[in-house]
Amino acid sequence: MDKQRHGITSQFIRLLMVAGLGCLLLFAVLRCALRFTLTAYADQSDFIQQETTRLVEEFQDFVTEEHLSSRDAHQITEWVQKHNFTLLELYRDHVLVYSSFAPKREIQGEQDQRVPFYDWQPYATIHFSDGDLEALLYSNTMRTYEMLGSSILLVLCLGLFLAVFLLGCRRIVRYICLLSDEIQAMACGDLDHNITVQGSDELTTLASCLDAMRLTLRQQHQQEAETSAKVKNLITQMSHDLRTPLTTLLLYTEIVRYHKYQDEGQLRDYLAKIDRKARQIKHLSDNLFEYALVTRDTAVTLDPPAPLSQIFEGPLAELVDQIQQHGFFCTLDLGDEDLSLTVYEPYIRRILDNITSNLLKYADPDHPVSVTFVREANGAGLTFANTILSDTDSAESTKVGLVSIQTMMEKMHAETRIQRDGRQYAITLLFPLASE
């Protein structure tokens, strides 16, 4: 109801009504003032008498020039019609022979056509070719001026109506021009300038939508810039980290190729180092591929809500089995609560695969690996804690695997927390609780 009341159409209707009624009222007031002024002037001056005298003289000149007789009613009528609001009656010996009220009726001087003749009326003698006639002539000149003045006032009021209407539309047009300028600025890449939102009509709704679109575009551009910066930084770090094992690998292969070793034992040692460096390079490339695969997925449809035990039962069993085969001891504390979470099952498996790979590469098998249930006000999840090897190789200084985990967690609207205190390391996966 509020939008309809303040819509552009209703604004135009109100503007038309206000301007129209205002101009009509002004026209009525000015017309009454004009009529009052003309009447007062006529009562206080001899203007009407002077005009009547002028018309009598003009009529006499017309009769003389045309050599008219009292029977030339047609020519007399044409003259009367050229002078608006004029009453003309002609009498001969108090008998009416012509009246502008009945111009087609010719009255001759028979005795039964005698009409009242008032001596107090101002009569003038007109000399016709067939004798003199008494003329009663009245011209309402003030009526003529009143009509002329009313026409002028009407034109002025119509002009005022258009001016008021255009002034009322000016705000809307100015707002449209402002929005047009801001849209052009946004199209040119300026996403920091707010779209002006004012009023409560359709243009206001449009401006609000445009501003929301501007914020969305700015956020997308910021995310794209951050992603691009991360990729560039990752490529730079990866090229540095790959160069070190590759250089060592080429050195050892050159030693083996040119038989620069002392005995078979040293050869086996070099071959073992070559294998270790090759696996290190493969591990880095696998992590890079994993990261590229995750960032390529633009949208993820989360699975229906499921209990935490059902989500992590299979992946956790695989993790525990793999690290135990490599001599690790694992403790599980999954708590008593089996809360419902909303996740993307393929991402869960890939995240735990990354965690398993990191444990096998960096964790100290002499210390247990713990998996603990975590419960917070708005979420729940698991914490994986371990002790880092004292002589850990810094081959994966780029942390590509960790970046992949964080990216997948963000796509599931979940949170990743990293804690490191000396050799103690913990990663927490915290998921929002599913709505009931």
Image (spheres, grey):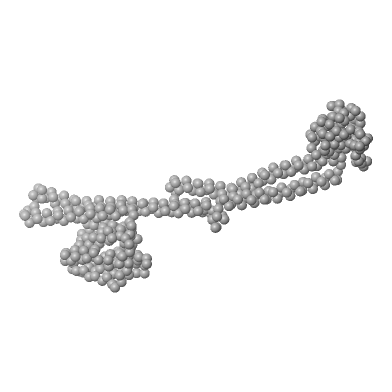
Q: Is residue 185 left or right of residue 400?
A: right
Say which residue appears at 29% left-offset and 73% top-offset: 336
Q: Is residue 237 left or right of residue 130?
A: left
Instruction: Report whether residue 45 is seen.
Output: yes
Quadrant of the rendering where the N terminus is positioned: bottom right
Q: Position of residue 121 (x, y in %)?
A: 90, 41
Say which residue appears at 90% left-offset and 37% top-offset: 113
Q: Residue furthest front?
A: 112
Q: Position of residue 279 (x, y in %)?
A: 18, 55
Q: Position of residue 324 (x, y in %)?
A: 18, 66
Q: Residue furthest left?
A: 263
Residue 61 lies, with reference to residue 247, above or below; the image says above
Say which residue appears at 85% left-offset and 41% top-offset: 48
Q: Position of residue 163 (x, y in %)?
A: 64, 45
Considering depth in this image, is 144 or 178 the residue closer to the camera? 144
Say which residue appears at 22% left-offset and 68% top-offset: 369
Considering depth in this image, is 244 or 4 the residue closer to the camera? 4
Total numbered labels: 0
Instruction: Report whether residue 387 is seen.
Output: no
Considering depth in this image, is 231 or 139 the residue closer to the camera? 139
**On the image, which quarter does residue 434 sit in?**
bottom left
**On the image, which quarter does residue 358 sit in?**
bottom left
Residue 355 lies, with reference to residue 141, above or below; the image says below
Quadrant of the rendering where the C terminus is positioned: bottom left
